[in-house]
Image (cartoon, rainbow, N blue to C red):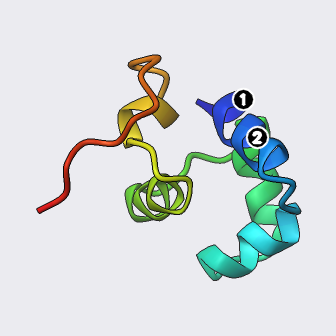
Amino acid sequence: MYTRIRELREKAKISQEKMAVFLDINQTTYSRYETGKLDIPSQSLIKIATYYETSVDYLLDITNESTPYPRK
């Protein structure tokens, strides 16, 4: 999971600082998410998946399908 969020961020050419601001956390916390030193809260996972237009399952490495599910 942790490598997926880093790969998506790097592919989008977004800094850790920008993602931290988006998630309303500090950059150190976000860095710990990417390195796996800190578990990502479910609400943050949902926000990250929405930001990158993918699914939480993709972020969690449950599937390789990056297309998000239809939203309600």
Secondary element under disc 2, as helix, strand or loop, is helix
Q: Amino acid at mark 1?
A: Thr
**How many angstroms separate mark 1 from mark 2 (CA)?**
5 Å
State the quadrant of the N terminus: top right
- Looking at the rendering, which quadrant does residue 5 occupy? top right
Q: Which mark is residue 11?
A: none
Dot 1 corresponds to which residue? 3
State the quadrant of the C terminus: bottom left
Label 1 neighbour load within 10 Å: few <14, some 14-19, many 20+: some
Q: What residue is shown at x 47% (from left), y 65% (from top)?
A: 47
Q: What residue is shown at x 40% (from left), y 58% (from top)?
A: 46
Examine the rendered structure and indicate whether residue 13 appears above or below residue 47.
Answer: above
Residue 30 in the image: state x and y as whole percent. 75, 60
Label 2 neighbour load within 10 Å: few <14, some 14-19, many 20+: some
Q: Amino acid at mark 2?
A: Arg
The residue most toward the left is: 72
Instruction: Note whether residue 37 is visible.
Output: no
Secondary element under disc 1, as helix, strand or loop, is helix
Residue 25 in the image: state x and y as whole percent. 69, 77
Between 10 and 33, the one nearer to me in the picture: 10
Horizontal relation, residue 33 to residue 35: left or right: left
Examine the rendered structure and indicate whether residue 3 appears above or below residue 71.
Answer: above
Between 34 and 55, the one nearer to me in the picture: 55
Dot 2 corresponds to which residue? 6
Residue 19 in the image: state x and y as whole percent. 73, 68
Q: What residue is shown at x 77% (from left), y 51% (from top)?
A: 12
Horizontal relation, residue 35 to residue 52: left or right: right
Horizontal relation, residue 5 to residue 46: left or right: right
- Looking at the rendering, which quadrant does residue 16 occupy? bottom right
Q: CB of mark 1 within 8 Å of CB of mark 2?
A: yes
